[in-house]
Structure formats: C-alpha cells, structure tokens
Amino acid sequence: MEKSGRLDLDSSEVNGTANKEPVVQATYKKLPEEDANWQSKTDQETDGKVQDTKMVKQNGAEHEVDDEAQERMLQDDAKLTPKKDATEVKFISENGDAKIDIEAVKQVLSGMGKEELMKFANDPFWIRLRWFLFIAFWFLWASMLAGAIAIIVMAPRCSTPEPRKWWQESPIVQLDGSETPSGNLKGLETLLDTIKEQGIKTISLASMVESSKDGHPINFRGIKSNLGTLTDLEAFIKAANSRGQHVVLELDPNHSSVEHPWFKSSVNREGNFTNYYVWADPKIENGEKRPPNNWLSVYGVSAWELNEARGQYYLHQFNKTQPELNYNNHEVVEAFGNILDHWLRLGVEGFRLENIRFLTEDPQLQNEMSHSNGAPGSYESLNHVRTRDRVENGVILRKWRNIVHNITKREGLFALCDEIGADMLQVYNNDDKKEGPLIDLSQSSQFLANAGAGISAEALNKSVSQNLLINEWPAWDLNGKSRSLRARVSPQVADSLTLMTLLLSGTPIVRYSDATAAKAAFAEVTKKRTAPAFLFGDIKTHIINNTQVFAYTRHWLKSGNPGFLVAYNSGNNSTIVDFTSVPHMAKEVTVVAHSPNYVVGGSDTTKTKLNSEKVPMAPKSTLVVSFVPGSGN
C-alpha cells in the first residue's frame, strides 16, 4: 500500500508497515436504504471531526472505498471461544492521515443459565453446604453478640463516687427555744425560711426533753411544757420537711433526774425498776457508811450518793441529782430503745446522743487505778477504765443504731455530741463490719470547741490534719458543751472561724447566731458544698509561706471542675500571701466570699480576680477563693 491512510487487508500492512498481529477477519452487513446517503451527511460535518465508524474527506483528498464500504461493519454475533481473542477495529484521524487501531475486546461472561443453576440448587451436596454456611453465619453472629455483651459486663468500670448523705450536704444548726422571743416551737418555725436561705438542711433540736427545774430529764417521751406539745413538734417537723430540711433530736441517755418516775420506783424497789439504776451497798468503816469504791464524778467529788430510803448508794458521774441508769441491765437498754422508736415515729430522722462515754460501768465495782498526770483528789487523778469508754458501750449503741436504721430504712442519722478518741472510734466501728460504721458523725474537734482568738495557724493545721486521719467525715463543733464560740471570742473572729470550717471535709455544727451573723458570706460558702470539688475532692492543709496563715484546698483533679482554697490569717497584722506555693494553684483566683473583717485598703474584693502571688489578708480574717487546678505551678 503506497498511499497514506489506505488499508491492504490481504497484506496486513498499514501505511506501508507490516502488521505483526494476526489478520482480523471482519464481517460486514449491507447498510439499510435509509443510510444510503450517509456520505452526503458526513460531508456537512466540519472541523475535521471523526464520527464513529464513518470516514470523511481529509485535506481535500478523496478517499476511495470499495463498493461494499457503504455497509456497516458489525461484530459477529457468534459466541466467543477461548481459542481466539475478539478484536475491535477503530478508525482514527491524525494529522490528515487515517489510522486503524485494533484492540482486543474484553470478553463478557454471561454466567450459567437457569437450567444449569437448578441442577446445583437441588444437588444434596450444595443443599448441605448452604445449610452449613447459614447455620455457621448465625452462630458466629450470636457468638460475637455474646462476646460484646460479656466485654461490656466484665470490663472494669470507672468507679462512681457515692452520693453524700443529707447530713453531709450542709452544716447542722442547733436550735432551742431561746433562739426566739416566744421561746417555743411555733417561734422556731418562723426561723425555717432563714435557715433554708443559709443553705442548711439539718436541724438539731437541743434541750427539748421534759425536765425538772434543774434541767434534768423526768420524761424521755415528752417535751418541755414551755416549748409546746408533741402536736406542735409534729407540725414543726412537717414544716421543716416541706422546705427540704431534716430534724434530729439531741438526747442524753446516761442519766435521769431524781424526780423521774423510774428513779422513784427504783428507790422503792418496785418490780423491774429495782435495778434500773446503779445501786451498791455502803462500806462500813469505824461504824460509818462509806461509798463502795473510789469512783469520782467529773466534778472531782465522790460519784456515790447515799439514799436513806433505800439504804444504798446510787451512782452519779455528774451532779448528785443525775442518777446513772444501769445499762448493764438489758431491760434498761430495751426501754431506751423504745424511747428512740417513739421519737422516730413522730418524724424525727435521727439523734445526736450525749454522754455515751459513761453508759456502762464495771459491774464488779472495782476501784479505779491512779493516774500520775492529775492533781491528787481531782477527776484527772484516776484512770477511768472502770467507768468510761468501755467496749460494752459500743454493743448498746449498735442495738440503738439498728432501731434507727430499721425505721428510717438506713437513711437516719446516728451521731454523738461527745468527743471520741481514735482508739474508741476504731473499736466501735469494728464492732460489726457488716453493718458499717457505728457512728455517723464522730467528732474530735475539742481544739475548736476551746479555741480562742489566739489559736495559731500551726495549731489549726496540726489538729485538722490529725482529725481527718482518724475520720474521713467528722463533725466540727465550734461551740462544745461549755462556753459557746461567741462567748469566747469577738463577733468578728467568730465569723471568721465559722467561715473557715464550712468547706472542711465533714459537717460543721453551728448555732443559729453563727449561721446568720455573716449572713451573705455564710450562705455563699455553704452553696459550694454541692460542688464536685467539695463532695468528692481531696483536701490538703497548708501553712502558707511559713507565715501565720492556715489554708486548705479542695479539688477533684480528674473532674476538670474548679477547686477552692480557704485561708485564715491567725496573725494580728495584715499580710500579703503568695498562694502559688500550693500545688495545682492557678496564677489567678476568684474571690468567692470573705469574713466581714476582711477589708484591705478600704475596698471590697468580693467577686473580683486576684493575683495568686499577691493576695492581701486582714488580721483574723478568712478568705475563700476558687481556681482552676493545674493552670498554674
């Protein structure tokens, strides 16, 4: 072939070049008449465009085709065989020349027909195989589901902190009739809204039991006539409950008045009451009656008083008008348990018991051993192992606690008004491990109950730290049994010390005057007791920069919530404090609240930002700030 663009099918040459590929035998079909004018149609096409399976004039040259060129080349409908590859011929125009590109056509597998498939569908082998695969699929699916469930169930969970009890969420306020001009329960009811505004959820009713003129119990089931009636008490409890408040009662089970019907019956040896109190025959020395042993009352005099009517001595570890109940007698234990049951059914939700250290005594009435630390003849001169802090006390307390648990569905408060040492607390709480701790709010905060304005930062740091070591959640009582906080220090210092205790781990015990004197500050800090940093966070105590400032922090690092720092300046002078020495302290802190005597430069710093390196503090003042843990040093 000499001319460009001509194809010699016999010689298999294209443009004079031998085609090394096998010769392609193409089949042709005659074009329909409707396409007879295809050449004229292609002449109207411009721009040298090449249409599929059509040829046009190139550069004015007339392209020659055979007579059968008007027929369209079609692919043979014959089936493909594996021996030969199907090819496709393409005509391509390039620079005025026509070229032919021959490619292998991709074979399309048509698959098996219906008849062939049906042969396999009914074949026993394939039937069994399909069932096997079906069952295996669902078995594997069920196994994976069971495995996923097992992983979820058995995987270790992140421990969720236990929610705090209602008596842990806020301070406890002590109330008695003297808090109001009316001096009765109806007057106390008018204080409930104020108490709620201060964030207090627990009310401890003190000095309620019906008593003699000298203030000692004559009826453990009744209340003082000047306070009202039991109906008034139920109304008070109902009003408190409607405000989300809980009422507990303070009781002293250790003794009664000599005017109590039980004691009068015991003097007369009437039935079971004969041994309701601790009686002992006198010693006869030189013809005179003497006390049966050397036991002393807390006032440093003999703990025995002769009752001429009965002809025996009765025991009193306090005043002689306060005879000791005999709790070595199980009937007395049961009788007082019934008293607790009586108050619980009236709506009281727990108790704070007083003088339980003296519940039982040595039934053999052996003499106390001398103690070298006390002055001769004083109460401290004896080691009171026969009359105080006996293991038997815990057994009795456990029985009473069970009564509280049974009636309140384990939600009631069972606490003490007394100080309790670490040794006795361990004994009580190990009495029955299945039942949990015996005492809900033990307290060893005598240092606070006796604290004066001169208490140092070092003393606070040491005492608070030691108290937290022996008890995770103690009671912090600033008033104690003797002199109240405001009788010992000025109102400004009292406000500072009260504010300082509000975020300690534990439950502060305050008077109504303590909660309302610095009203705004008290309420603001009490609200922070609902924060995660307080409820679940750690507490660390510090003496800042070796100065007179005592401080502690509350933060729960893994929660990402703000922490708190409470600082008390025990010194007599103003000072600048650097908080950045405290671990996880931020460079900036936000003031939450402060005591009324916190005035620096005549400005109020409430709700302001302070540089942690330079925090001013007035003498005897308390400052409470919040911070983002870890954002500083």
Image (cartoon, helix red, strand yellow):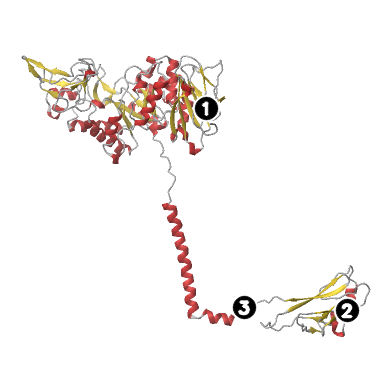
State how far apart marks 2 and 3 are (Cα): 41 Å
Mark 2 or 3: in front is 3
Q: Which of these two is toward me, 626 or 229?
A: 626
Residue closest to the far left: 287
Residue under label 3 = 111
Circle 1 — which element?
Answer: helix
Depth order, front residue of 346/256: 256
Image location (x, y in percent) of residue 582: 49, 28
Contact flag, marks 3 and 1 (Cβ < 8 Å): no
| Mark closest to the chain's N terminus, 3 or 1 | 3
Kind of element beneath mark 2:
loop
Q: Quadrant of residue 349?
A: top left
Give the quadrant of residue 18. Answer: bottom right
Identify which residue, 7 or 301, lies in the foreground: 7
Residue visible at 16% across and 18% down in the picture: 305
The residue under label 2 is which amino acid type? Asn
Q: Tell whether label 2 touches label 1 (CB within 8 Å).
A: no
Question: At label 3, which amino acid type do we have?
Answer: Gly
Residue reaching furthest to the right: 60
Residue at mark 3 to residue at mark 1: CA–CA distance: 80 Å
Q: Which residue is mark 2?
A: 37
With respect to residue 386, does 28 lie above or below? Answer: below
Horizontal and vertical percent for residue 69? 85, 82
**Circle 1 residue:** 580
Marks 1/2: CA distance? 99 Å
Name the amino acid, label 1. Answer: Thr
Q: Position of residue 505 (x, y in %)?
A: 41, 30
Can see residue 236?
no
Q: Earlier in the sequence, mark 2 or mark 3?
A: 2
